Amino acid sequence: MDTFSIGIDLGGTRIKSGLLKNNILVEKKIIDAESDKGLQSNLHKLEMAIEDLLKKYEVRNGMLNGIALAFPGIVNPVSKKIISTNKKYDDGPQLNLEEWVSQRWNTAFYIENDARMAAVGEWVFGAGRGSNDIVAVTIGTGIGSSAIIEGRLLRGKHFQAGCLGGHFTVQYNGNECTCGNIGCVEAQASTWNISKMIKADPDFLKSSLANETNLDFHAVFKASQKKDVLATRIKYECLNIWSSGVINLIHAYDPEVVVLGGGILNSKEEIIPYIQQRVDQYAWCPWGKVQIKASELMEDAAILGVAYCLLHSL
Ligand SMILES: [Zn+2]
């Protein structure tokens, strides 16, 4: 008999649900999310997406191994509770998601941090295959990270070890971060603050970026290719901040491979060699060279990782 499971990646702006048949991802459904309005208000849409997938593949009672959720916050996978959030799905800690899954689908439930699950996905199926010492970094709305050390997925006593690479301080007197700290990697260079940074720049009105409606990294990289001075300055500023963040993670977790993912990797031809060169130049690694790789699974990484963890204890 075929067996099925559902892996869900709860992103800040999109929720991706994947159906796995005999452990292979066969179909995904992507719905728009309003993470600032909380998780409860998005659950109905998510339920419909799951129901559609189950119906289409005629998954009946007893054929579903479980539903697994990759969540953008600090999660306790043992109690299956969300511990803490940061401006996304802030009602998460009050919800009993295990009960929600059990009542509707009478199946097993698993939940873990999204970046941690992306790391597992890349380790088992993607760019991290063949190494047991990996750091994964996802640069999107925010910046997530996770570490696998000597084949063990790092969680820590309070389940936050490895996950907070986006909140490593790179500038002690920098921008205020949503987490309460100052000068975090993601407060200095992530999608949620890039447009504010560009608009605050004294050169903004002289730049072609002033004509862009969507001031994101795509716009910055595109304008930089056309030799826009402000876009080029901001691009290198962000590349250097990400490089510093990656070097901090290398110094903290001693990986052989760093896998970079997230929407920003659309410009991977520029980003990967640049960060590799900074790491080669500045990271303290007497044993050899840490490889900087682009994600192979991209937006499937967390879905595949969390579906894997539903069935395997790591
Ligand atoms: Zn922070």
Image: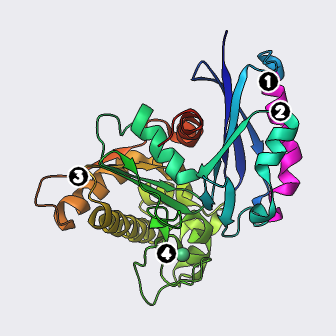
In this rendering, which labeled residue sits more in front, label 1 or label 4?
1
Extent of the magenta region: 36-54
Q: Which amino acid does label 2 sit on?
A: Trp
**What residue type is disc 1 on?**
Leu
Q: Do the residues labelled 2 and 1 touch (CB within 8 Å)?
A: yes
Q: Is residue 219 shown to the viewer in this render?
A: yes
Label annotation for residue 290: 3
Residue 244 vs residue 136, the one in the foreground: 136
- Identify the residue position indicated by label 4 in the image: 188
Q: Which of marks 3 and 2 is in front?
A: 2
The x and y percentages for residue 112 are: 60, 51
Q: Mark 1 points at which residue?
A: 54
Q: Distance between the residues labelled 3 and 4?
A: 24 Å
Q: As displayed, is residue 16 above or below residue 13?
A: above
Sequence-first tag of 1 and 4:
1
Q: Which residue lies furthest to the left in this view?
A: 286
Within 8 Å of ligand 1, the CB of disc 3?
no
